[in-house]
Amino acid sequence: MDGESNTSTSGGMQAMDATTDEGADDWGPFNRPLFDDPGARALSRVGVVDVGSNSVRLVVFDGAARSPAYFYNEKVLAGLGQGLVQSGRLNPEGKVRALAALERFAALAKGMDLPPLSCVATAAVRDAEDGPEFRAEAEARTGLKLWVIDGLEEARLSAQGVLLGWPEAEGLVCDIGGNSMELAEVTGGEVGRRVSSPLGPFRLQQVADGSKGVNSYIRKVVKGLANEVGTNHDRIYLVGGSWRAIARLDMERRKYPMTVLHEYRMEPEELLKTIEWIAKNDLMTLRARTGTSAARMELVPLATRVLRQLIRTFKPKEIDISSYGIREGLLYEQMPKKLRGRDPLIEACRFAEKTAARMPGFGKKLNDFLRPVFVSASPERKRLIKAACLLHDTTWRAHPDYRAEACFDNVTRANLGGLSHGERVFLGLALLHRYKNSRAGSRLEPVFALLTDEQIQDAEILGKAMRFGAMFAVKSPEEAGSLVWLEEKRELELLLNPNAKALFGEVAQARFKSLTDAMGATAKVTLSEI
C-alpha cells in the first residue's frame, strides 16, 4: 500500500480544523443539531457543500427527514486536485473556479434564507501544501468554514450515505474521487472496516511508465486494500461521479430502458464487457450519447482500469450504483436511531402525500380497505402496496389526459431510496393503472420489460384496486363497506353498508368489475346487515 492507506473501525465525526471554536465539533460541520426530536418526520431546509478533488457541489436538502429530497443541487467541475501529485499544491485554475463557486453558493444560500452552509473538504484540500491557505481565503471571501476530513472519515460518511438510501446494504462501499478512493464495509446497518487509497484518476495520471506502469500500480494498491478489508463481499456499492459515468455507459451499451442511476445493478461479467466496449470506442462520441461532461469523461479510462482490478480482486456477485454519498452521510450522522430505523421509501411517500395529495391521510385508509385483496402477498410486496396507496393521489393536478403517465414518470424518476429499478417500475405501473384501465400502446412499454408477466399482472390488479377504492367513498372506503377475498372460490365480495348503497353507482360498479376481471375472479356484492 506504499504507506498511503490505513484502516479504522471507530466512528464519530472528527474535527480536523484546529482553528475551529472550542466545542464546535459537537455536531460536526453543521455545528448544530438537525433533529431535535428523535421522531421527527420533516427536515428543515439545510445546505451542504462538498469540496472535492474534482467537483465542488452545493446540495440543499428538504422534505422527509428519513428520505430528504434535493431542493437544490449544483456542481462545478473545478479540478481542484489536478496536478497535485506533481506540484504538491492545488491547481491554480481550479482554485479560481472553486472559490468562485463557493462565493456563488454562499450568495445562493443567503437568497434562500438558509442556515449557515455546512462545508466539507476532502483529499485535495487535506493533502495540498496550500490547503490551509485556500481554506483561509475561502472563509475570508465567503464566510464559509471548510471542515477537512481524513480518508477514513470520508469512507465512513460515504458508507453512511449509502445506508441512508439503502438500509439493507451489505457489502463494500467504494467511493472514488479525483485524488483518492475509499472502501468501507457495511453490514447490519453499521459501518465496519475502512481504508483510504491513492487511486483517484488525478493521481493515476502522474504514475510513471505509461499504461503498463499504471496497471501495475493499481494491482499493487488493490491487493493491499483486499488485505485490509477482505474479499468476502458479495456486493460492491459504487459512489462517485466517475463510477456513475461508467454505469451510464453500461446502460447505453446494454440499451437499458431507464436512466436512473441510483440502485442500478450490474453483473461483473457484463460490466467487464462494458469496460472493453468503452476502450474500443471514441470517448467524445460516447460522451455525446450519454450527456457526460468532457471533464468527467476524461477521467473515465483510468477509472475503468481501477474498476476492472476491483472486479478481478474482490470477485463480487453484484455491483450496484449509489447516488448517495458523503453529503447524505452527513445527514445520516445526525439522525437519531429511531429515525434511522424507518423505511426511507414509506417516509418519502408519506411526505409526498402530506404535501401534494388532496386528502392527506386517505392513503392509509385506502391501504387498510384493500388489505384483504393482498392478504397473501409477501412483506416486500405489501410494502410497495402501502407506498402506492400513499402516492395514489399525489399527481391529481396533472392534466387528466396525461395523469396516468405522469404518475409513472414521477415514481420511476423520483429521488426515492430503498427501491430497486424493478420495484420502481412495479410501483409506477400500479399508479398508471390507478388512472387508466389499459396500458396498451403506451410510450412506456419498453420499461415494462424490467418486470415479469406475473409482476405486470400484479401491478395492474393493484392499480385497479386503487382505482376502485379511491373513488368508492370520498372520506373513507371502510366506512362504506369492506372486501372479502375467497381465494379458493376465486371470488371477491364487497360487503356494502346499508347507508352507503348510493355510493355503489354505475362508475363504481364498472371499476369493481374491472378489478375482478383483472384478478380472474367473480364479483359478488352483498348488502351488509350492520
Image (tube, rainbow, N blue to C red):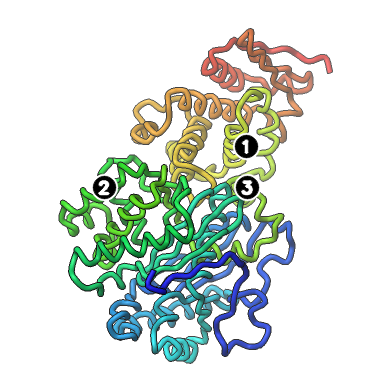
* Residue sitting at x 59%, y 10%: 522
Looking at the rendered structure, the kind of residue marked 3 is: Asp
Asked whether the viewer can see residue 293, the reply is no
Looking at the rendered structure, the kind of residue marked 2 is: Thr
Q: Which residue was labeled with disc 1?
A: 386
Q: Nearer the viewer, mark 3 or mark 1?
A: 3
Reply above or below: 221 against 265. below
Res. 25 mark: none
Measured Cα–Cα span from mark 3 to mark 2: 34 Å
Reply above or below: 348 against 197. above
Q: Nearer the viewer, residue 22 or 272?
A: 272
Mark 3 vs 1, N-terminal side: 3
Q: Nearer the viewer, mark 3 or mark 2?
A: 2
Reply above or below: 394 against 482. below
Q: Horizontal and vertical percent for residue 216?
A: 26, 63
- Left/right placement of residue 411 relative to residue 297 reads right
* Residue sitting at x 58%, y 64%: 9
Q: Label 3's element?
A: loop
Q: Nearer the viewer, residue 494 or 413?
A: 413
Measured Cα–Cα span from mark 2 to mark 1: 37 Å
Q: Horizontal and vertical percent for residue 171?
A: 50, 50
Q: Label 1's element?
A: helix
Q: Nearer the viewer, mark 2 or mark 1?
A: 2
Neighbor class of circle 2 (other Cα within 10 Å; few <14, some 14-19, many 20+) is many
Looking at the rendered structure, the kind of residue marked 1 is: Lys
Q: Label 2's element?
A: helix
Mark 2 vs 1, N-terminal side: 2
Q: Are marks 2 and 1 in contact (CB under 8 Å)?
A: no
Q: Which residue was labeled with disc 2?
A: 274
Q: Which residue was labeled with disc 3?
A: 343
- Left/right placement of residue 424 relative to residue 298 reads right
